[in-house]
């Protein structure tokens, strides 16, 4: 499976402009990827002002993602500000060609920025079967909580979308690799670059790791990273070392 990780600067609180820029980037993709991954809140940046975003923008972005999936015959993944029943969510959408999609609401809202006071936290993980692989998609701050990502459901790919700022980028680098090793799963992380009106800067570090922690891709600039996933390689590693056979079993509370 070919995966395109699009690392880009985001235009603050402007969904239409962000959709246009990503449509242009998607239109220029080569090698016909099976999956296209965009950053966290890719239509707005990491805003704590969801009331500035028109309520219908969530549905517009859903429709746009469906159009991109149809046009490219690829899955399209990213999170957005989504309003539902008078509440706001940082909601990830995994859109497949044909209009079928799954959603995941960010479990660990970022208290340091006040995200917990604005957005409703999610309560369930979402496991998605897409073509030959099983995915567990998560969002940014979720990366710091290994119990939430623990591979108790035999997924193949752990996927993070993020707006992770430069001052703490060392944690992002180390935790992405740690998640791949402990879960024996491909681990992909897509971050943004540039800056936002809150004075935060972002230097990318989008990356991909195989199930043994070997880095497959990495970048600090605006570009599209290409990662190839091999089910045979993953199964060979798991069958050789069998570390997941010794994992602990537990139940997560809502």
Image: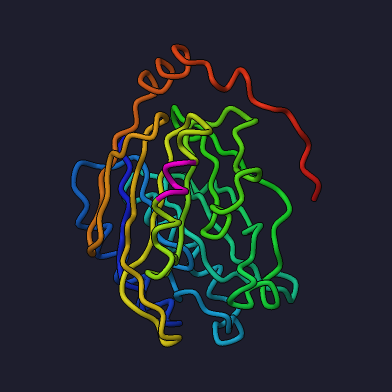
Of 89 and 202, nearer the camera is 202
Q: Residue at x 35, y 79 (%)?
A: 195
| Colour logic | rainbow
Residue at 51% over, 38% down: 135
In which quadrant of the rendered view does residue 91 lie? Answer: bottom right
Q: Position of residue 142 (x, y in %)?
A: 58, 55
Identify which residue, 104 or 210, lies in the foreground: 210
Front residue of 57 and 148: 148
Q: Is residue 89 above or below residue 129?
A: below
Dominant SS type (magenta): helix
Q: How many numbered marks have been drawn onto this rendered protein structure?
A: 0
Q: Is residue 51 left or right of residue 17?
A: right
Specify the segment rendered in magenta: 174-178
Q: Position of residue 174 (x, y in %)?
A: 42, 49
Q: Residue 46 magenta-drawn?
A: no
Tell me if residue 195 comes above or below residue 207 in the rendering: below
Residue 230 position in % (x across, y down): 34, 26
- In the rendered structure, the answer to whether residue 195 lies left or right of residue 113 reads left
Side of 124 relative to 71 (left or right):
right
- Residue drawn at 47 percent across, 51 percent down: 160
Image quadrant for the N terminus? top left
Residue 92 % position (x, y): 55, 57
Decide if residue 18 is on the left or right side of residue 139. left
Q: List the single residue furthest toward the top.
A: 240
């Amino acid at each position: 499976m070919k995966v395109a990780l699009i690392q880009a600067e985001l235009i603050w609180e402007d969904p239409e402009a962000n959709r246009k820029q990503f449509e242009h980037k998607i239109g220029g993709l080569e090698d016909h990827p099976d999956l296209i991954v965009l950053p966290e809140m890719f239509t707005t940046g990491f805003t704590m002002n969801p009331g500035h975003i028109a309520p219908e923008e969530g549905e517009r972005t859903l429709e746009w993602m469906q159009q991109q999936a149809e046009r490219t015959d690829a899955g399209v993944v990213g999170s957005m500000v989504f309003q539902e029943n008078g509440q706001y969510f940082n909601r990830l959408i995994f859109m497949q060609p044909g209009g079928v999609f799954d959603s995941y609401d960010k479990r660990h809202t970022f208290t340091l920025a006040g995200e917990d006071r604005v957005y409703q936290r999610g309560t369930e993980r979402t496991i998605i079967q897409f073509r030959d692989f099983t995915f567990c998609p998560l969002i940014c701050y979720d990366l710091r909580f290994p119990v939430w990502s623990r591979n108790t459901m035999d997924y193949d790919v752990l996927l993070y979308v993020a707006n992770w700022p430069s001052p703490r980028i060392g944690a992002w680098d180390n935790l992405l690799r740690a998640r791949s090793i402990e879960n024996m799963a491909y681990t992909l992380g897509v971050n943004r670059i540039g800056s936002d009106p809150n004075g935060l800067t972002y230097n990318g570090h989008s990356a991909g790791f195989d199930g043994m922690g070997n880095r497959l891709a990495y970048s600090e600039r605006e570009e599209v990273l290409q990662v190839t996933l091999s089910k045979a390689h993953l199964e060979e590693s798991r069958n050789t070392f069998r570390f997941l056979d010794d994992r602990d079993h537990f139940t997560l509370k809502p």
